[in-house]
Image (spheres, grey):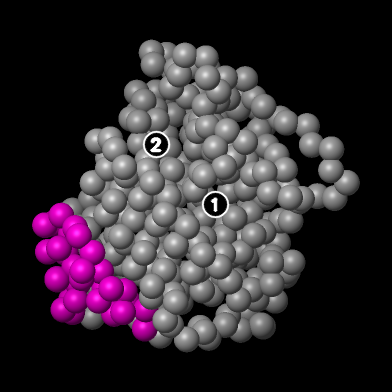
Amino acid sequence: MSGFESIQPDPSTIGRLLPPPFAVLPDPRRLFRARAERFAALGQAGDLSPYLRFLAGLCEAQAAVADTLPPPEPIPAAQVERAREGKMPPLDRNAFRDSPGLRAVIGPFLDAMVPVPKPQPAQDALEWLRRAPEESMREMLGNVVADAIPLEAIPQHLFLSAAAQIEAARLASGLDAAKLVPVEMGVCPVCGGPPAASLVVERPGAEGARYAACAFCGTQWNEVRIKCLACGSTKGVGYKAPDEGGAEPAIKAETCDSCRSWVKILYHRHNPSLEPVADDVASLGLDLLMQGTEYRRAGFDPFLIGY
């Protein structure tokens, strides 16, 4: 396969006495500020630098809004318990679309985006959103919570996705991680979304463990290594990355021959600065290489729609 280096699975035997935590919940302020810093660092040079710098400003706006909002109304305890018993995510995306909490975030976030440097299509989309009729706003939010962003209205949906991320992360942060349970393979245990990517971490107590990362609510959850995040198969799992002259790549495509899908996997041991959403966008070259293969992308990142 031209331009690729095929890589053997890397199980990384881990000699720990206790299993790693199942879920790591977001701290919204730290999440968006760290993501902004990573986007800014990645945007120093390269063809993608203007877009990456724009996303750095967007994430700074997310962090600023998260800093100023009062604590959210938590997900009701009874709803959380029902979800736990039924192995369902406690954050109901359909109800979330019409929630007062989300609507209270959208206005301040759009206001915070006004001074952020942006291309003209994004500026036009922002101005339109700030006076959008309720019917249009509700329809677009429906697309956002369904991870179904239409190509003809990407800028508007990007802004609404960013606003939704703020409120979803705030709600996720108020949960008890110890009470979360697996839903399905490759499904966020908080909001039910697919991962943007997975990350092999080096944090204490979880060295070498693999965590899937949700772009919607910011939750990370532990998944078995060398297992397809789309179908759960352990057969025919492989790894591909651009040929870097023998250097071990920090970002690979984890492919599955059972369902013909792929999801990015990032390795902190090669680069501890990796951030799942930011580095997913910045590694667009891997996506472009994978477009020439028989595999389809299974990860979802709203900041990569249209690329």
Marks 1,2: beta carbons within 8 A: no
Q: Amino acid under label 1?
A: Ala
Q: Relative to 203, is 233 above or below? A: above
Number of the front mark, 1 or 2? 2
Helix or strand or loop: what does disc 2 sit on? loop
- Asked if the stretch drawn in magenta spans residue 131, the answer is yes
Instruction: Specify start and end residues of the magenta stretch as a single range.
Output: 104-133
* Dominant secondary structure, magenta: helix
261 in relation to 80, above or below: above
* 1 or 2: tag closer to the N-terminus: 1
Give the secondary structure at mark 1.
Answer: strand
Compared across the picture, whether 183 is left or right of 195 comes to right
**Residue 43 in the image, given as x and y percentages of width and height:** 32, 44
Instruction: Using the rendered view, name the quadrant where residue 154 is placed.
Output: bottom left
Residue bearing mark 2? 283
Nearer to the camera, 278 or 81: 278
- Front-most of 249 and 137? 249
Q: Position of residue 206 (x, y in %)?
A: 73, 48
Question: Is residue 228 depicted above or below 181 in this figure?
Answer: above
Residue at image position (19%, 76%) is 130
Q: In what quadrant of the picture does the C terminus appear?
A: top left
| Residue farthest right in this picture | 17
Estimate how packed mark 1 is, as few (under 14), some (14 to 19) or many (20 or more) residues with alpha carbons within 10 Å: many
Residue 240 seen in the figure: yes
**Amino acid at the residue labelled 2:** Ser
Q: Position of residue 173 (x, y in %)?
A: 58, 71
Q: Which residue is mark 1?
A: 213
Based on the picture, tell me whether residue 61 belongs to the magenta stretch.
no
Q: From mark 1 to mark 2, how far is it between C-alphas? A: 16 Å
